[in-house]
Image (cartoon, grey):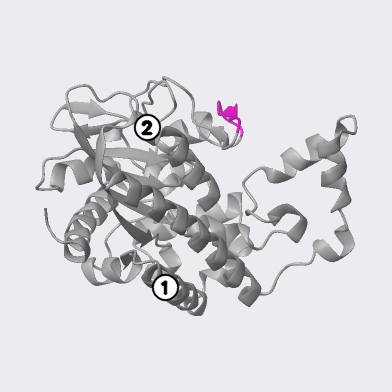
Amino acid sequence: MDPIKKLTPYMDSYSREFADSGNINWLPYTMYFHPFNYRSDVVNTDGSGFRYSMQRGQQYSVTDWNGIDVCRVIAGSSTAFGIGASADLHTLASRLSEHDSSGVPWMNFGGRSLNSTQEMILFSLHRHQLPKVERVILLSGFNDLGLARLPKRLRMEHGAFFMCNEFFDAMRKKKQSRFSKWLNAGDARESEDELPSLGEQIDYAVTLTLRNLANWHAMCVQMGAKLTFVLQPLANWVRKTGSPEEEILFLAREKQGGFAEQYGDILAHGAYVSYRDRLYEGAKALDVPFIDLTSHIRAAIADDFWLFVDRIHFTDQGHDVVSRLLVNLVNETEGSP
């Protein structure tokens, strides 16, 4: 039997409907988002595609939160969304809602396969639909670094995004317009298809992430919400060898897609340290508290603890451990309520 199906049978729900080839919605500004009003035993979304979080038997979402007048938000990409959770109850937003002594529910603002620009735009488009926001955790950082290795013609000024090849190719095939002429004008593929060096990738990802963090900071100041930036962890950054279950899953997924081959250089410890330190200094300059989740997870778990379902997404017990860490760390950096 396929080890992925055996160990994580619920992951089919994500790959069927929430993957690039699934039932995603094509939207202006953010490009794409989750299915609207989706229902299953694993994932449920509201009318705008945001995943529900659970707190003591009640469910809340960005656009469906009757009965409360204040909330907290966890935003980011697929890790914040909760890929890897076997049900809505086990996402970071839900576990934060359960473990946060304030009793204030956490809203899930995660969007699968978003870069930092898309994360920021998504929040700017929908923050008016929330009740008063007390705190925001921005769990981000990997996608900008992973996408920074794409050619310059795809990265442009605001960062490459997942499925950007399909987008640009489709636009070039259409009848020439001012927009498509602009796209083709920058198509000097010989020089722009070169793979950037690791240093160039880190430089680009740091610049883009911090530029968007400044926008987050401005929005949160205007809203009166406390913002914390959390650098999301990768399995290779946390430890060299995973739990027995992780190693089985990593091997099976390498045969399917070659994550390590595609992102090999940025999985190295030196790349992590350089990226982390640069982001820390940038966040400090913006007066935004910074949490390196990797080091705290490393200190909190045993060698055989099953944390990841793949190299970036958590198991149910992984979500629970990480949420407990985040509650304590956010209170330490921002002051308890």
Residue 73 picture location, percent across and down: 30, 43
Task: Look at label 1 and name its amino acid.
Answer: Lys
- Count residues near mark 2 (Cα–Cα under 10 Å), then give few for <14, some for 14-19, many for 20+: few
Q: Which residue is mark 2?
A: 128
Principal secondary structure, stretch drawn in magenta: loop
At x 82%, y 45%, the residue is: 183
Residue 62 in view: no
At x 57%, y 71%, the residue is: 202
Task: Look at label 2 and name its amino acid.
Answer: His
Q: Earlier in the sequence, mark 2 or mark 1?
A: 2
In this view, 3 is above or below 146: above
Q: Looking at the picture, tell me which residue is in the foreground, 226 or 41.
A: 226
Indicate the secondary structure of the residue bearing disc 1: loop
Residue 15 picture location, percent across and down: 51, 35
In this view, 57 is above or below 289: above
Residue 62 picture location, percent across and down: 34, 31
The span shown in magenta is 21-28
Q: Which mark is residue 54?
A: none
At x 40%, y 72%, the residue is: 285
Q: Which residue is mark 1?
A: 240
- In this rendering, position of residue 189 left or right of residue 45: right
**Does the magenta-highlighted stretch encompass residue 257?**
no
